[in-house]
Amino acid sequence: MDRQRTLLQMAQKMSAAIASEDWKTLAAINTLMGTVLPQMAAQGNWTSAERAALSALRQMHNEAVKRCDRATSELGKRLHDMQVNKEGWLAYALESDIAESGIQA
């Protein structure tokens, strides 16, 4: 297994997944890293090129964590806003239903 190439490919795939906010792919890469990195480490000392590739992957992983945290925070805010405006949404839905059916409750 060419460790440098594998590390760089994982970093590249992670970068693409971050850019497209592909959370499933990010999760799969994260799981893969948990399996593959210990296997790679067991192969012996890292060359300087492999350490550089590992560092690039680590930096990309840190970026992925930041993006996931940001998306989680944004989703939490949206859910909070929906909860706060729940009565308004229900009233709007009821009004729309009445307008469509012509039947008043």
Image (cartoon, rainbow, N blue to C red):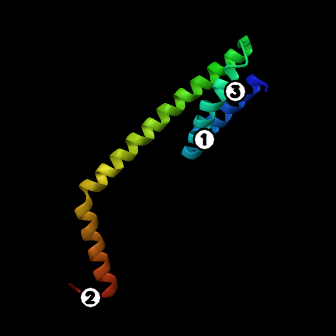
Between disc 2 and disc 1, whose residue precedes?
1
Give the foreground label among 2 and 1.
1
Q: Which mark is residue 28?
A: 1
Residue 33 position in % (x across, y down) = 62, 31
Q: Amino acid at mark 3?
A: Leu
Residue ID at (79%, 25%): 2
Q: At label 2, which amino acid type do we have?
A: Ile
Q: Pointer 3: what residue?
A: 7
Where is 62 relative to 104, above or below? Answer: above
The residue to which callout 2 is attached is: 103
Amino acid type of the residue that numbered disc 1 sits on in the rendered structure: Ala
User: CA separation, marks 2 and 3?
Assistant: 64 Å
In-image side of 104 versus 20 (left or right): left
Relative vertical location of residue 91 with respect to residue 105 in this rendering, above or below: above
Measure the C-alpha gap from mark 2 to mark 1: 51 Å
Q: Are marks 2 and 3 in contact (CB under 8 Å)?
A: no
Mark 2 vs mark 3, foreground winner is 3
